[in-house]
């Protein structure tokens, strides 16, 4: 088992060196985040039936995506608070 893991690391290193040595574009599909960080400078992500292009490696993509998610959550919370405040005023008016 250990030989397989060592061979896998060696192979990934060789592939990363090969890809980094070429100027042509390529598509890489992998679950290995460290490998993706080594060989990517753009991430094309399919999210909620939309395709998004992120500049940077996988770590940059994760940070950018999480910031975007937090912005959406804050917008939803603000919208919900606005709606609740409107309903509070409406209920207060009905009670009067």
Image: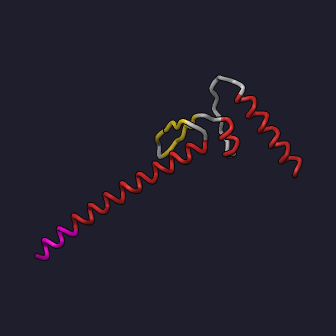
Left or right: residue 81 versus residue 41 is left
Where's residue 55, x and y in %?
54, 35
Q: Nearer the viewer, residue 87 or 66?
A: 66
Q: Is residue 90 magenta-colored?
A: yes
Vertical placement of 15 versus 34: above or below? Answer: above
Q: Nearer the viewer, residue 81 or 51?
A: 81
| Residue at the (22%, 67%) spot, across then down | 87
Where's residue 37, x and y in %?
65, 40
Which residue is the extreme one toward the right?
3
Q: Is residue 86 magenta-colored?
A: no
Q: Quadrant of the C terminus?
A: bottom left
Where's residue 15, x and y in %?
76, 33
| Residue at the (81%, 38%) spot, across then down | 11
Q: How many marks?
A: 0
Residue 85 sits in quarter: bottom left
| Residue at the (39%, 56%) spot, across then down | 74
């Amino acid at each position: 088992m250990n030989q397989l893991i060592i061979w896998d690391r060696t192979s990934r290193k060789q592939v990363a060196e090969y890809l980094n040595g070429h100027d042509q574009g390529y598509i890489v599909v992998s679950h290995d985040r460290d490998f993706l960080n080594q060989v990517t400078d753009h991430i094309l992500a399919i999210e909620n039936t939309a395709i998004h292009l992120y500049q940077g490696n996988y770590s940059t993509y994760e940070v950018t995506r999480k910031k975007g998610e937090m912005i959406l959550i804050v917008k939803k919370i603000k919208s919900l608070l606005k709606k609740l405040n409107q309903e509070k005023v409406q209920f207060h008016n009905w009670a009067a």
